[in-house]
Image (cartoon, rainbow, N blue to C red):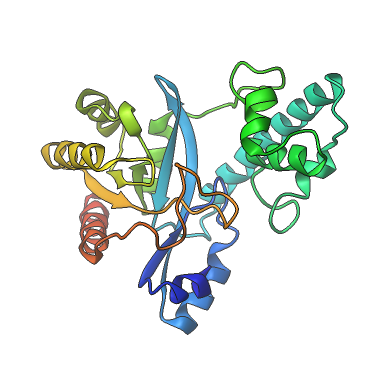
């Protein structure tokens, strides 16, 4: 990842895989060699009034035992959900097993299993034409193989992240990012809003910027890069979303202020 970042002339990247920090140390070491700053992070899923909110946690100490315990428990819950999805697919006559899904994880069994991995396995085994087809036929909410995800409260995640010295940002909010809703999230410990995202048109980005300014929330942005095979409206190529250096400087200032408030 650091080499790709260097190739597209980025100065810094944040690595925020879902429910794991396993790749951060290697990326940081490679980044040091190449002159690319790698900000250690993670992406959490939490409860929201509309179902699920993704929360980016930045500047995480990857050696924190409370953090790693929480992430291990979350990955275990995701695996149990994957097993339930596979069982439903098998009941529907789809020739798939958990090993097919597990093979989609980078690095074997250490990552966080989710529906996209099941979707790719469905494509590989010929049951679906593409990932969109897999979600439309089987995996989307209300479809035959859908299984709900157990989700923590936002306040639980923000407290954990603050305790280990990090910042939190509400990711790709879209039309859910009303000022009233963000006030509620701010009361639950939210630090920032991801305003620049491939799914956010310019008008939405500008509105979120204004809301962040009024509420005193930080701003972040990124490509939401998931690999070369997954772009579409929700992802962009690495380096595809230009983020000003000053945004990172402002986050670091906010991080310093937060650290002064901690006992």
Considering only vertical position in the picture, is 63 above or below 26?
above
Give x and y (percent) for residue 155: 38, 32
Q: Residue furthest front?
A: 129
| Residue 25, quarter of picture | bottom right
Relative vertical location of residue 233 with respect to residue 15 in this rendering, above or below: above
When asked about the image quadrant of residue 247, the answer is: bottom left
Task: Farthest residue to the bottom: give it.
Answer: 33
Quadrant of res 211: top left
The one nearer the camera, 44 or 90, is 90
Horizontal and vertical percent for residue 122? Answer: 76, 37
In the picture, measured across the screen, residue 119 lies left or right of residue 7, that is: right
Residue drawn at (33%, 27%) of the image = 176
Number of callouts: 0
Can the viewer see residue 263 in this picture?
Answer: no
Tell me, yes or no, if residue 113 can be seen here. Answer: yes
* Residue 7 at x, y percent in the picture: 46, 76
64 relative position to 86: left or right = left
Farthest residue toward the left?
Answer: 214
- Residue at (79%, 29%) from the top-left corner? 86
Q: Residue at x 39, y 19 (%)?
A: 49
Q: Residue at x 24, y 26 (%)?
A: 178
Q: Position of residue 144 (x, y in %)?
A: 71, 17
Q: In the visual, does 238 lie left or right of 101?
A: left
């Amino acid at each position: 990842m650091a080499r790709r970042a260097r190739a597209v002339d980025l100065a810094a990247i944040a690595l925020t895989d879902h429910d794991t920090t396993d790749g951060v140390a290697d990326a940081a070491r490679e980044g040091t060699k190449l002159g690319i700053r790698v900000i250690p992070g993670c992406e959490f899923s939490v409860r929201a009034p509309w179902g699920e909110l993704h929360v980016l946690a930045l500047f995480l100490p990857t050696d924190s035992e409370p953090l790693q315990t929480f992430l291990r428990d979350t990955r275990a819950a995701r695996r149990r959900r994957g097993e339930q999805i596979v069982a439903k697919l098998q009941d529907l006559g789809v020739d798939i097993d958990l090993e097919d899904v597990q093979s989609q994880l980078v690095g074997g069994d250490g990552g966080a299993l989710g529906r996209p991995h099941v979707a790719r396995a469905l494509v590989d085994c010929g049951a679906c034409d593409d990932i969109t087809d897999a979600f439309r036929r089987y995996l989307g909410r209300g479809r035959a193989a859908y299984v709900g995800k157990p989700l923590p409260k936002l306040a639980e995640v923000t407290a954990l992240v603050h305790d280990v010295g990090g910042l939190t940002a509400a990711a790709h909010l879209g039309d859910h990012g009303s000022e009233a809703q963000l006030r509620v999230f701010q009361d639950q410990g939210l630090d920032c809003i991801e305003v620049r995202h491939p799914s956010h048109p310019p008008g939405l980005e500008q509105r979120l910027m204004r809301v962040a300014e009024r509420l005193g929330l930080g701003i972040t942005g990124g490509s939401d890069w998931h690999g070369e095979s997954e772009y579409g409206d929700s992802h962009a190529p690495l380096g595809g979303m230009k983020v000003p250096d000053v945004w990172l400087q402002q986050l670091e200032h906010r991080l310093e202020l937060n650290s002064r408030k901690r006992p």
